[in-house]
Amino acid sequence: MNNYNNLAAPDNPAGPELIRKEIAAVAQWGREYHRPLWKGEFTAQDGADLNSRSQWMECVRKELEANEILWSVWTLLSDSASYIYDIKSGQWIIPLTQALGLKELIFLPT
């Protein structure tokens, strides 16, 4: 636990390799038991810098998609520590929407 978020991504115990390993294990279970999988809400809280949050969200999304696991993200508006749309400024948090692969943002909250 001492190295959590203190090491570069390849060596970080919570880095991309762990994400790949965990998602691959779940995907294997789904294939073995013939079960469709859906990853409920996930996000990266704002305790980290925006670049790190974006990289983490992109890594999780890509691994889920590579393993044919459907997903949803938490949250659009309700949690100020993890939202992807800033209601005060009326702006999408572009690095996060890009990390999620959202190319066209049609929904505009009021």
Image (cartoon, rainbow, N blue to C red):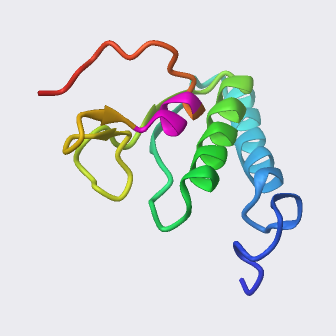
**Residue 103 lies within the magenta run:** no
Q: Nearer the viewer, residue 109 or 3?
A: 109
What's drawn in magenta, residue-wise? 93-98
Residue 107 position by quadrant:
top left
Q: Residue furthest front?
A: 89
At 59% from the left and 43% from the top, the residue drawn is 57
Residue 80, compared with residue 58, is above or below; it is below
At 73% from the left and 50% from the top, the residue drawn is 19
The answer to whether residue 87 is left or right of residue 21 is: left
Q: Residue furthest bottom?
A: 2
Q: Residue furthest left?
A: 110
**Residue 97 lies within the magenta run:** yes
At 71% from the left and 37% from the top, the residue drawn is 29
Residue 110, compared with residue 95, is above or below; it is above
Query: Percent from the top left, x then y, of residue 80?
Result: 28, 55
The answer to whether residue 3 is left or right of residue 69 is: right
Q: How many marks?
A: 0
Task: Report the quarter where the C terminus lies.
Answer: top left
Q: Nearer the viewer, residue 89 or 95?
A: 89
The prevailing secondary structure element of the residues shown in magenta is: helix
Query: Percent from the top left, x then y, of residue 67?
Result: 72, 27
At 35% from the left and 59% from the top, the residue drawn is 81
Task: Report the quarter where the N terminus lies.
Answer: bottom right
Q: Nearer the viewer, residue 21 or 93?
A: 93
Query: Percent from the top left, x then y, of residue 22?
Result: 73, 49
Q: Nearer the viewer, residue 89 or 65?
A: 89
Query: Percent from the top left, x then y, of residue 53?
Result: 57, 52
